[in-house]
Image: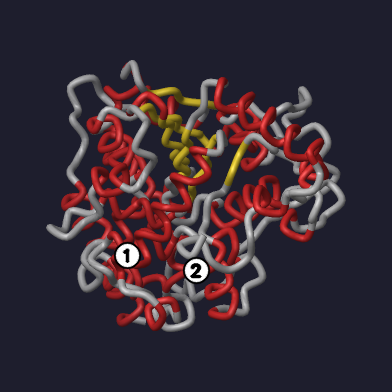
């Protein structure tokens, strides 16, 4: 219990004087353990609805249908009211408490696994107080203990953070998939895992969204195109490279579900609901809403604005074509036996437009070509 810390888990609230409650909880545990269970890693990348998805997952797995935090209940029998009772979002309670103090964002509970990846990734934290409380080893031990604890209690696990896109880093210190799996439950196989990755289009809109997130307060879009493709170690090109992320998880031997966001929107569905209904097999209506959830899924962290002076539709079209040529390198993945593509729309249109003998371009080539478009826009601005 000392490893878990903070608020107590639901199983620890059982009234030991109530034999009926104890027996009921034991029956539920045995039922869960007899079911085929899964671990779903919701892996980003950045700017593909991650904040909204994480917030909704946390709510569905820890809040009751009447909007009360599950840890407020002292009667374990009342836990039947949790929206997804067979699933756990296994963040350590004590880290929830520290992270809640660390930010004014109301949706920090959904972000609980970002420090997990930062601890795995050379222990580099983004100015978080959590680093003042724990060493990286202590932090990783907390996560590993909680993840194992919830698995041993018979839950399916959902673990999500956009920081998993660091798997797609070309730097020597990039995030290793093996390190992630090492901190998952010990009594599992690779077939127990499903990795969810989202694909955003138009492709240039993904890059623009990252500009809104990282840089619009400090620079124009044209400056961003030049700086982001050089000074920041191709961070922007990593974030839009969803298909490389798919390739890396597949190569490791994991099952991957790729969701084409354009197809989800065409159907009028919510992305969080789609993951719950189509990936996690939650009980849902034919309109892809979770049965019993009376609250609309929340949309978080949508940013707009910035300076797009001297940026024309022609420039944006050039960037779109460059990124699509990068995607052509991965068109062979559509036939991979461990890849399931949901709501395919724009992604298949992009693949179909690739020449059969076109191997696409490398990430370095994509970065260089986008950089040149930025230089072209800067030149136009200077000439004016």
- Image coordinates for residue 48, horizontal then vertical, percent: 51, 50
- Please name the residue shown 43% across and 72% down the image: 214
Crowdedness near tag 1: few (<14), some (14–19) or many (≥20) residues, C-alpha within 10 Å: some
Pointer 1 residue: 119
Q: In terms of depth relative to the viewer, which is nearer, 139 or 175?
A: 139
Q: In terms of depth relative to the viewer, which is nearer, 379 or 252?
A: 252
**For the image shown, how many numbered marks are present on the structure?**
2
Alpha carbon separation for disc pair 2 and 1? 26 Å
Note whether 277 is above or below 181 in the view shown. Answer: above
| Residue projecting furthest to the left | 172
Pointer 2 residue: 212
Mark 2 element type: helix
Note whether 143 is above or below 378 in the view shown. Answer: above
Q: Is residue 168 among what the camera can see?
A: yes
Quadrant of the rendered image containing residue 117? bottom left
Colour scheme used in the picture?
secondary structure
From the viewer's perspective, tell me whether residue 162 is left or right of residue 90.
left
- Please name the residue shown 33% across and 28% down the image: 190
Q: In the rendered image, which quarter contains the C terminus?
A: bottom left
- Image coordinates for residue 142, horizontal then vertical, percent: 42, 60
């Amino acid at each position: 219990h000392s490893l878990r810390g903070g608020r107590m888990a639901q199983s620890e609230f059982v009234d030991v004087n109530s034999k009926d409650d104890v027996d009921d909880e034991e029956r539920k545990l045995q039922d869960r353990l007899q079911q085929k269970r899964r671990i779903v890693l919701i892996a980003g990348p950045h700017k593909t609805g991650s904040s909204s998805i994480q917030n909704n997952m946390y709510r569905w797995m820890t809040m009751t249908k009447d909007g009360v935090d599950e840890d407020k209940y002292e009667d374990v029998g009342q836990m039947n009211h949790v929206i997804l009772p067979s699933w756990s979002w296994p963040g350590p309670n004590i880290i929830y408490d520290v992270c809640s103090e660390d930010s004014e964002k109301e949706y920090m509970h959904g972000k609980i696994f970002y420090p997990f990846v930062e601890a795995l990734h050379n222990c580099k934290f983004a100015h978080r107080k959590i680093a003042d409380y724990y060493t990286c080893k202590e932090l990783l031990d907390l996560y590993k203990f909680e993840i194992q604890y919830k698995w041993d209690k018979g839950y399916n696990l959902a673990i999500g953070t956009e920081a998993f896109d660091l798997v797609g880093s070309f730097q020597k210190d990039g995030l290793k998939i093996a390190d992630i799996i090492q901190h998952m439950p010990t009594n599992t196989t690779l077939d127990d895992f499903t990795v969810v990755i989202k694909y955003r289009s138009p492709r240039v809109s993904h890059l623009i969204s990252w500009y809104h997130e990282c840089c619009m307060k400090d620079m124009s879009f044209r400056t961003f195109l030049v700086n982001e493709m050089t000074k920041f170690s191709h961070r922007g090109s990593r974030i839009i490279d969803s298909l490389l992320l798919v390739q890396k998880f597949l190569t490791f031997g994991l099952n991957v579900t790729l969701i084409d966001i354009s197809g989800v929107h065409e159907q009028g569905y919510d992305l969080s609901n789609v993951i719950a209904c189509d990936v996690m097999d939650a009980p849902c209506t034919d309109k892809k809403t979770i049965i019993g959830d009376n609250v609309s899924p929340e949309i978080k962290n949508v940013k707009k604005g910035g300076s797009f002076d001297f940026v024309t539709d022609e420039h944006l079209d050039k960037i779109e074509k460059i990124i699509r040529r990068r995607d052509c390198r991965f068109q062979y993945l559509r036939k991979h036996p461990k890849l399931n593509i949901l709501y395919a729309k724009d992604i298949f249109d992009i693949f179909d437009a690739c020449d059969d003998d076109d191997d696409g371009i490398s990430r370095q080539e994509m970065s260089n070509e986008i950089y040149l478009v930025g230089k072209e826009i800067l030149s136009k601005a200077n000439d004016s």
